[in-house]
Structures are given as structure tokens and as C-alpha cells.
Amino acid sequence: MKGVLAAPGDYVHFKSQVPLHKIPIGSKQWRYYDFGPKTVAPLICLPGIAGTADVYYKQIMALSMKGYRVIAVDIPRVWNHMEWIQAFDKFLDVINVHHMHLYGTSLGGFLAQIFAQHRPRRVKSLVLSNTFLDNRSFAAAMPWAPFVSWTPSFLLKRYVLTGIQDGPHEPFIADSVDFVVSQVETLSKDDLASRLTLNVDAASVGSLLLSDQFITIMDTNDYCATPQQLKDQLSERYPEARRAQLKSGGDFPFLSRPDEVNLHLQLHLRRVGVEPQPVMARGIPPGSGTGGSQSKEKDEEEEEEDRHGPSKDGGNSAASSSSGSDPLPLPPPESSESPPTSADQLLNKDVLAARSYGAMAAFLHHLVASYVGYVYISLNYGRDSRQMLM
């Protein structure tokens, strides 16, 4: 595995434009991004053990510009699946989301199914990627699970990273691995311990009220940490679900194959009846965002920065893909000033007239003073000349 490199340029631009929200709900701290038209039912992205809300930044950038609302969340510190259901339920109430579409990868896909099983009225569709129905095989492979909360942070990180295949990768897969490794470094000991506990807390997904027609299974055909047997069980459970097979992409196709993943997500959302609103979508202009708990002072500071200086990446697009294509240009920020009314126009005309009158009066005063001075000098010169002749 390569060493952790500097953050990609499109990620730096994303961080400079899309606000990160942090809100406490009860004893849980939620960290998330929310971007796109609020009138559209959101696509909520749930990461795996090694992921954070940041790993979906390419989906947030691309889909929000198409007119979709995307919410990416960190899995909070919960220690069993029922606690997860209750915590996620409260989070949705706080951000005023009643119906949503869930996109989950690995552990996130497992938690998405469990939530859909217990809260069927809220979940309108599912996109499941490299995930599973039953986690008992993971529990058997981790006999030290009862002591996970006492395990040092560096050992937990090492255990999580061993699940990521080491060795030579295609460049775009290697870049995705490096990015995820950098995100693992940001997770605390309790974050990792709670996620590992959720992954091995013996449970299986029951039957869903959601029709298979509203489910898309998106898997990669190359190496993946989720065993193929578990992925096959998922396909058998939802035989009528739409299949989206990616030839490659590894464990993190949302980073390594963002164009393909974003296309499949758009097809899924359109198929389940989500209509984008591109007219309302403003791309990722400076100082804009949707929803969240950021303070007004912080928003004003960001707007002041954007007015007086370019962003760190020189204003490049935030929609570049790992394939090396040029980023899409972002639309300029819309003006917040309202058009002038007729009263304002009349007032402006009066002000201009007053200024013109004042300028004319000053000019005439200067002209009269000059003329009087000229007459005075001429009279004195004529008198002196007559005296000399006499």
C-alpha cells in the first residue's frame, strides 16, 4: 500500500465549498454533508467501517450539479443495531427528512437494510454495494470482539487496514485506497470500536416490505473485502433487483470509478421516480450549501473570503473524476441582490439630478469669479495706463 499522499485537488476544492455539519442529538454526535435542492427526496450515503462522510465527495459534487440532493453521514458511535435504528431515526427527524433513498457500501449497506426492515415507511429505495445480509461469518473471524472497546487505537486501525488488499493496484484504485487510509487516520478509538462491534454483532436482515424493483445491487467484479459467497446471498435474496456490475473498482468504487457509480445512481433515482431539479441546483458555488447547523457568522466569513480572493485550487471545477478527465466548470454564484423597484429607480434619478445640479452650480460659480477677476484686472490696467500717459 502506498503512503498517504496529499489530498486530491478536487477534494480540497470540495472542502472549501461544501460545509461540514456537526450536530449533537442526545448523546450522539452526527457529522455529515448535505447539498442539493431541499425539495428533492435525498440520497443518503452510508459508509463502511473504514469510511467517513468525506469518501462520497465525488457523488455530492456530481449529483448535486444534476439537481439531486445528497447527504453523506458518518456512522455515529452506536454499539448495537437497535441503537443504530433509533439514532438514525432521530437524526432524520432533526434534519427534517421524512423519506429518503439509501446508498450503503459494505457495513453501510448492511445498516441500510436493517433500517429499511424496521422503518419501511421512510426508506423509498436502496442501492447496495459490496455488502451482505448476515454478519455471523465476521463474528467468527474476530474472536477478540468482546474486548474491542479496550483495544488500543493503533491496533484497531491496523486491523481495519488489513482488510484492504495490499499490493500493486491500477492507479485509480491505488488513489482511492490512499484516500480511505487517510480517512481512517481521522477516526478515534471509539469510532473504530463501535463500527467493528456493529460489524460482528450477530444479526441478519429479515424480509423487507420494499419491492425488489426499488433495489439496485452495485458490485465490483475484482477484489473486494466482502466474500463473494455473501454477495451471492444478497443477490439471491433480491432476485428482481436491478444489477449494476462494475468490471473493476476494488472496495471503493465510489472513489475509483465515480463516473460509472454516479451514472448508476442517477439511473436508479430516475427509475424509482426521483425527479431532479437542475434549475435549483447551483453546482458548488463559493459559500453555498444546503441544510445543517453552521452558524451565520461562519457563513458570512466564507462569503467574505470568496468575495476577496480565489479558492485554494484557483477556481477549478469540483467535479473531476479519477479517470483524469477535465473537471466540469461550475456556474458563477447567483447574485443575492434583488432587482431595483420603480421607487428605487426614481430615487436614483433624483440623486443623479441633485448631483448634476450641484456640479453645474459649482462650475457657474467658478466661471463668474473668473470673469469678475478678469474685469477687475482689466480696469486697473486701463487706469494705470492713462496715468502714465498723463
Image (spheres, grey):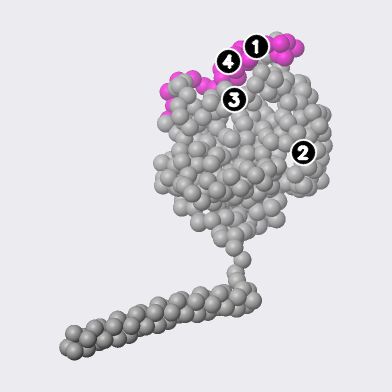
Estimate the spatial distance between the alpha carbons at disc 4 and disc 3, rounded to whole Å.
13 Å
- Mark number displayed over residue 361: none
User: Of marks 4 and 1, which one's residue comes earlier in the chain?
Assistant: 1
Amino acid at circle 3: Thr
| Residue drawn at x 58%, y 15% as measured from the top left | 158
Which residue corresponds to mark 1? 152
Q: Amino acid at mark 2?
A: Phe
N-terminal of the pair, mark 4 or mark 3, is: 4
Q: Nearer the viewer, residue 341 or 69?
A: 341
Q: Residue 41: x, y in percent?
A: 70, 51
Q: Main secondary structure of the magenta part?
A: helix
Q: Which residue is mark 3?
A: 186
Highlighted magenta segment, given as a residue range? 146-170
Q: Name the residue: 57% across, 27% down.
A: 183
Image check: 269 left or right of 4? Answer: right
How many other residues sit within 10 Å of disc 2, few (<14), some (14-19) or many (≥20)? some
Q: Secondary structure at mark 1?
A: loop
Q: Mark 2 vs mark 4: which is more N-terminal? A: 2
Q: Residues within 10 Å of mark 4 (few under 14, many from 20)?
A: few
